[in-house]
């Protein structure tokens, strides 16, 4: 995928913290928490993925590395939307869903 166009028109860059999601708007920022090890990363949705009942998000390589899921390729994750409302102290992110992610 490196260098190919994503559904948003951007070029895929495996070194950026991005993700593909079937329904969320492009530009949506998500906190992705790996429930197996507690690590988390904030990604920006810039691509679409096929709907799959077990996998809810596909992460870029950099995002997958950030939450230590490269070796397994999949992890059970929790997604929370990160709102950028300009406030200095952000309120708790809105829960989006909890299922598996794949890289």
Image (tube, grey):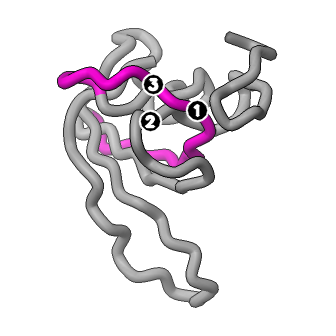
Q: Which residue is mark 3?
A: 49
Q: Position of residue 80 (x, y in %)?
A: 35, 57
Q: Position of residue 52 (x, y in %)?
A: 26, 21
Q: Residues within 10 Å of mark 2 (few under 14, many from 20)?
A: many
Q: Which residue is mark 1?
A: 47
State which quarter of the image contains the N terminus.
top right
> Left or right: where does residue 97 sit relative to residue 60?
left
Question: Is 89 or 23 nearer to us in this picture?
Answer: 23
> Left or right: where does residue 31 sit relative to residue 44?
left
Question: Is 27 or 91 nearer to us in this picture?
Answer: 27
Q: Check if residue 28 falls in the magenta segment.
A: no
**Do the numbered discs 1 and 2 sit on residues whose CB atoms are within 8 Å?**
yes
**Do the numbered discs 3 and 1 sit on residues whose CB atoms are within 8 Å?**
yes
95 lies above or below 34:
below
Question: Is 27 or 81 nearer to us in this picture?
Answer: 27
Q: Residues within 10 Å of mark 1 (few under 14, many from 20)?
A: many
**Which element carries disc 2, helix, strand or loop?**
loop
| Label 1 or label 2, whichever comes before in sequence order | 2
Q: Residue at x 50, y 71 (%)?
A: 83
Q: Residue at x 54, y 55 (%)?
A: 28
Instruction: Find residue 21 and name its label.
Output: 2
58 lies above or below 74:
below
The magenta span reads 37-55
> Left or right: where does residue 13 sit relative to residue 44?
right
- Quarter-of-image position of residue 99: top left
How far apart are labels 2 and 3 at the CA level? 5 Å
1 lies above or below 31:
above
Q: Position of residue 82 (x, y in %)?
A: 47, 64
Q: Check if residue 52 falls in the magenta segment.
A: yes
| Label 2 or label 3, whichever comes before in sequence order | 2
Q: Residue at x 59, y 48 (%)?
A: 26
């Amino acid at each position: 995928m490196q260098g190919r166009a994503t559904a948003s028109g951007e070029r895929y860059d495996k070194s950026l913290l991005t993700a593909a999601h079937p329904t969320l708007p492009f530009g949506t920022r998500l906190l992705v928490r790996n429930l197996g090890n507690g690590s988390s990363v904030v990604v920006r949705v810039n691509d679409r993925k096929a709907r799959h009942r077990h996998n809810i998000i596909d992460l870029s390589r950099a995002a997958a590395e950030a939450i230590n899921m490269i070796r397994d390729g999949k992890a059970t994750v929790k997604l929370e939307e990160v709102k950028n409302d300009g406030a200095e102290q952000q309120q708790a992110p809105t829960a989006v869903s909890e299922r598996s992610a794949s890289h």
